[in-house]
């Protein structure tokens, strides 16, 4: 069940009234938060200085995915596009899982927080993008704002914990990681 505030925010942010170019842009933003973007980490796994952060990041994103799937199964919240006649999914395909929490918001905030913990400048670029990814899910009619907020908090917490874990476990993290080294330069 959503609150009246959640419902009001959904109605305000839902992009069902927008023209095709804007919807296309929103779909492009939401794609940035999809699991396919993890493929961008693969080259880093083969570069010695990036290997440890990239490996921890991949494991972190798998953990985020598992936690989100578990919470979705427990919560069982119906998506707005399935619960309201005025809301229809504006994305290319309707997600089949439950709504709460947003996996896109969780994954993108986990990644942005992970990077921000290692390199504040890069993280400051990724953080607004991650927030836009979360908002795009509401605009597409597939999440309530509280789904996105819960996913963002969950993802940020796991991203921060993964970065702290990496810093405590990898002796060379501080001295050899190009992410940390660039921050110190």
Image: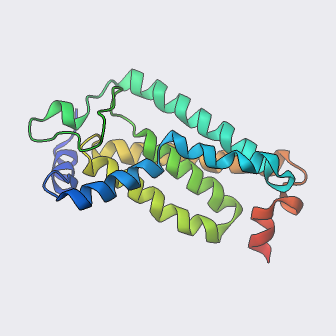
Q: Is residue 121 left or right of residue 152?
A: right
User: Residue 28 at x, y = what percent?
Assistant: 38, 54
User: Residue 35 at x, y = what percent?
Assistant: 52, 40
- Front residue of this view, candidates 178 and 174: 178
Residue 81 vertical placement versus 163 (above, below): above
Number of numbered discs: 0
Extreme residue in the bottom direction: 185
Residue 96 vertical placement versus 22 (above, below): above
Q: Is residue 83 left or right of residue 77?
A: left
Extreme residue in the left direction: 85
The scheme the figure's colours follow is rainbow
Quadrant location of the C terminus in the rendered image: bottom right
Quadrant in which residue 126 is drawn: bottom right
**Can you see residue 165?**
no
Quadrant in which residue 116 is drawn: bottom right
Quadrant location of the N terminus in the rendered image: top left
User: Residue 129 at x, y = what percent?
Assistant: 46, 61
User: Residue 179 at x, y = what percent?
Assistant: 75, 63
Q: Is residue 46 left or right of residue 74?
A: right
Q: What residue is at 64 percent from the left and 58 percent from the top? A: 115
Residue 164 vertical placement versus 93 (above, below): below
Q: What residue is at 47 percent from the left and 56 percent from the top? A: 130
**Can you see residue 35?**
yes
Q: What residue is at 59 percent from the left and 64 percent from the top? A: 123
Q: What residue is at 67 percent from the left and 59 percent from the top? A: 117
């Amino acid at each position: 069940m959503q609150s009246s505030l959640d419902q009001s925010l959904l109605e305000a942010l839902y992009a069902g009234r927008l023209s095709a170019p804007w919807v296309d842009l929103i779909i492009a933003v939401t794609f940035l938060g999809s699991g396919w973007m993890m493929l961008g980490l693969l080259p880093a796994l083969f570069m010695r200085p990036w290997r440890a952060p990239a490996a921890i990041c991949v494991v972190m994103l798998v953990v985020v995915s598992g936690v989100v799937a578990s919470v979705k199964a427990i919560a069982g919240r119906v998506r707005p596009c399935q619960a309201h006649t005025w809301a229809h999914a504006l994305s290319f395909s309707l997600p089949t899982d439950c709504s709460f929490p947003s996996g896109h918001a969780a994954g993108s905030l986990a990644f942005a927080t992970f990077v921000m913990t290692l390199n504040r400048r890069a993280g400051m670029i990724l953080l607004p993008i991650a927030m836009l990814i979360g908002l795009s899910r509401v605009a597409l009619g597939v999440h309530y704002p509280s789904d996105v907020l819960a996913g963002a908090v969950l993802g940020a917490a796991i991203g921060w914990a993964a970065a702290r874990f990496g810093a405590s476990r990898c002796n060379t993290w501080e001295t050899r990681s190009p992410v940390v080294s660039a921050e110190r330069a």
